[in-house]
Image (spheres, rainbow, N blue to C red):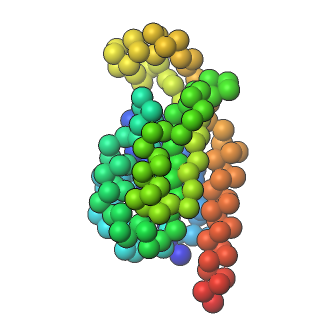
Amino acid sequence: MKVLVSAASKHGSTAGIADVIGSALMTGGYEVSVMEPARVDDVDDFDAIIVGSAVYAGHWMKPAIELTERFAERFREKPVWLFSSGPIGDPPKPAEDPVDVVEVMKVTGARGHHLFAGKLDKAMLSFPERAIVGALRAPYGDFRDWDEIRNWANEIVVYLGEISAARR
């Protein structure tokens, strides 16, 4: 079974989450391709799809939205999961799903969405981004919970295993 993991990431934090998800799926015995949304030319060869995006100002990044719109019909024919990355702090805030997620779930027929905490690295930010972070008094740091990410990916591994067993 072939799985696509595609995530839009501005500074690499969400791409790191996609890599960990891909590794968990590979460990589960699946053939996995992890790639940026703009590099996805076709989804026909994949049996399952996971799409993620960093969240800025409550919204998914444009490349992730465009990917889901480009292949909406094909996505609805396959098991699809979505994830977002962005809340920071301890506890991570904001805790609510990004504005776009309800529509993206509808367009793709996704089985679910998971919101993961993100990372805010001052060295990676532009001057305007640092100004916004300062005005919001947002904390810097890596708030990603790798166990939570792997556990979510392993739930997908179990589900895909059940699909595979049912097909035999």
Residue at x 32%, y 67% (from the top left corner)? 42
Q: Is residue 94 positioned above or below 103 on the image?
A: above
Q: Closer to the camera, 23 or 98?
A: 98
Q: Closer to the camera, 29 or 55?
A: 55
Query: In this orientation, does residue 52 appear?
Result: no
Judge left or right: residue 166 versus residue 47: right
Indicate the position of residue 163 as horizontal and vertical percent values.
Answer: 62, 77
Residue at x 66%, y 38% (from the top left corner)? 145
Judge left or right: residue 57 versus residue 67: right
Q: Is residue 93 positioned above or below 78 on the image?
A: above
- Where does the C terminus fall, quadrant-wise? bottom right
Indicate the position of residue 58 as horizontal and vertical percent values.
Answer: 45, 33
Indicate the position of residue 128 as horizontal and vertical percent values.
Answer: 33, 16
Q: Closer to the camera, 167 or 125?
A: 167
Return the residue found at the far bottom.
168
Residue at x 62%, y 62% (from the top left corner)? 156
Query: In this orientation, does residue 90 appear?
Result: yes
Indicate the position of residue 37 as horizontal and vertical percent values.
Answer: 35, 52
Q: How many marks?
A: 0
Judge left or right: residue 40 versus residue 153: left
Residue at x 64%, y 65% (from the top left corner)? 157
